Amino acid sequence: MAPAPSSSPDTAFTMAFQPIVDAVERRIFGYEALVRGPQGQGAAQVLASVGPGQRFAFHEACRVRAIKMAAALDMDVKLSLNVAPNDVAGKEECFSTAIATATRHGFPVDQLMFEITEGERVPNLGDLAASFGAFGHLGITSAIDDFGAGYAGFELLAAFQPDLVKIDMNLVRSLDSDRVRRTLVRGVARTCGELGVRVIAEGVETRGEYAVLRDMGVSLFQGYLFARPAIGVLPPIAWDAL
């Protein structure tokens, strides 16, 4: 059983949870775990205090904390954990640590979801696909986060077809009044649909954005329209927004 990693000693943190809702089935699909400071500081401020050499250990500590908290909250849906692609490509540590932590705290392994952040280049995309393939029998869900905001979204999608793709909030923002954004998002949704990949629209804040996305066939949503992240608790959902 893999030991739980520890964060850098000078970095205090906790985790917030934001729901992902299924608009068709009117249920909670899962919760994304988001790092926060002890006084509610945002992720960018917390990560700024973590040195480059401590990043992997800190990210591991965040995932461990999120799983422990989710288990304590009796979460019975997906728990979405952020991972850097080069932390999992051709490696097993992220998976083995998460699996060991989930097992130790009674959290179902098949409720774990790994969101691959799109903010760095991956030298060998085949290794990334192979890593997920090696643990696929355990039911771990895979997702590409912030699609459209990073280096090579379609290149990553071509090499690795995950279970889910999360469309970046900057593409979602005001797409009901922006023809270019509507066209781009419609193209992503259509491409993912043809590949059998489900789409999550993140950062949805208005009923107008939601309505256009529903017309495109998107059924999974995350954003302030439904609930803001809440530290240490599972926030209530604004179901009247659907």
Image (spheres, rainbow, N blue to C red):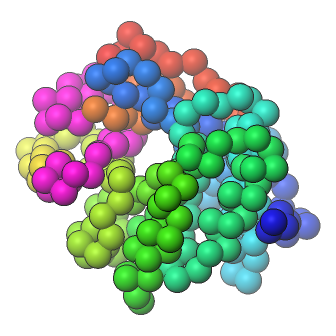
Q: Residue at the bottom extreme?
A: 123
The answer to whether residue 145 is seen in the rendering is no
Q: Residue furthest right?
A: 9
The image shows residue 228 at horizontal and vertical percentages of 54, 30
Q: Which residues are magenta?
A: 191-218
204 magenta-colored: yes
Total count of labels: 0
Q: Residue at x 36, y 53 (%)?
A: 163
Q: Is residue 174 left or right of residue 169?
A: left
- The answer to whether one can see residue 163 in this image is yes
* Relative to 215, 18 lies left or right: right
Q: Is residue 144 above or below residue 228?
A: below
Q: Which residue is most to the front?
A: 137
In the figure, residue 69 lies in which quadrant?
Answer: top right
Q: Residue at x 64, y 54 (%)?
A: 43
- Of the pair 20 and 164, the residue shown nearer to us: 164
Q: Is residue 67 above or below residue 119?
A: above
The residue located at (32%, 41%) in the rendering is: 201
Within the magenta stretch, is there residue 34? no
Q: Position of residue 209 (x, y in %)?
A: 25, 31
Q: Is residue 76 left or right of residue 7?
A: left
Residue 161: quadrant of the picture: bottom left
At x 44%, y 82%, the residue is 127
From the viewer's perspective, is residue 29 above or below residue 86? above
For the N terminus, the quadrant is: bottom right
User: Which quadrant: the C terminus?
Assistant: top left
